[in-house]
Image (tube, rainbow, N blue to C red):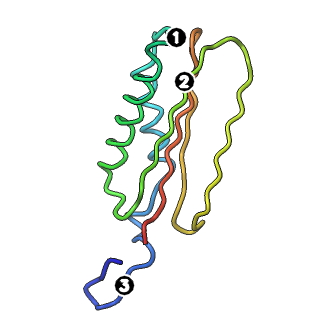
Amino acid sequence: MAESGTGTYLIRPDYQKKFKPAIVKEFIHDIVRERLSGVKYEAEKIPELCSSLAECIRDKVKSIGFDKYKIIVQVMIGEQRGQGVKMCSRFFWDADTDNYAEDVFMNDSLFCVAAVFGCYFY
């Protein structure tokens, strides 16, 4: 655990360093649209594209400085065929410190769901 200057241990993040879903959602939105606008679905390129997007999103979120947060990024891309998709994640977490942000992108060829989870590391 991190020790503060007063000799006590921090078990909650400072308000300024708390995971902020609205800011993270904006980052996801901007990165995904910049990287996927005009891209056509090609199955053989999707694994690398998912990985690249996840790394880019992770690096941008980490640059904010959410101290002591484990950042988890999940990116899923599928071919756009008018089908429905349901996605679910379950975590055991602290509702006071942990949170997530997600965004969905669609064009004529593909859809992308990107989610970022911020879990406070005690």
- Would you name the residue on which mark 3 appears? 9
Disc 1 is placed on an element classified as: loop
Question: The N terminus is located in which quarter?
Answer: bottom left
Question: Dot 2 corresponds to which residue?
Answer: 77
| Earlier sequence position, callout 2 versus callout 1 | 1
Q: Amino acid at mark 3?
A: Tyr
Which image quadrant for residue 48?
Answer: top left
User: Could you give the CA–CA distance between mark 3 and mark 1, rounded to whole angstroms?
Assistant: 49 Å
Q: Is residue 117 above or below residue 78?
A: below
Name the residue tied to disc 1: 41
Q: Give the image location of residue 89, x and y in percent.
A: 64, 47
- Label 2: which secondary element: strand
Q: Are marks 3 and 2 in contact (CB under 8 Å)?
A: no
Label 3 vs 2, first from the N-terminus = 3
What percent of the width, then of the height, locates residue 41? 52, 10
Task: Please state which amino acid type lies under the numbered disc 2.
Answer: Ile
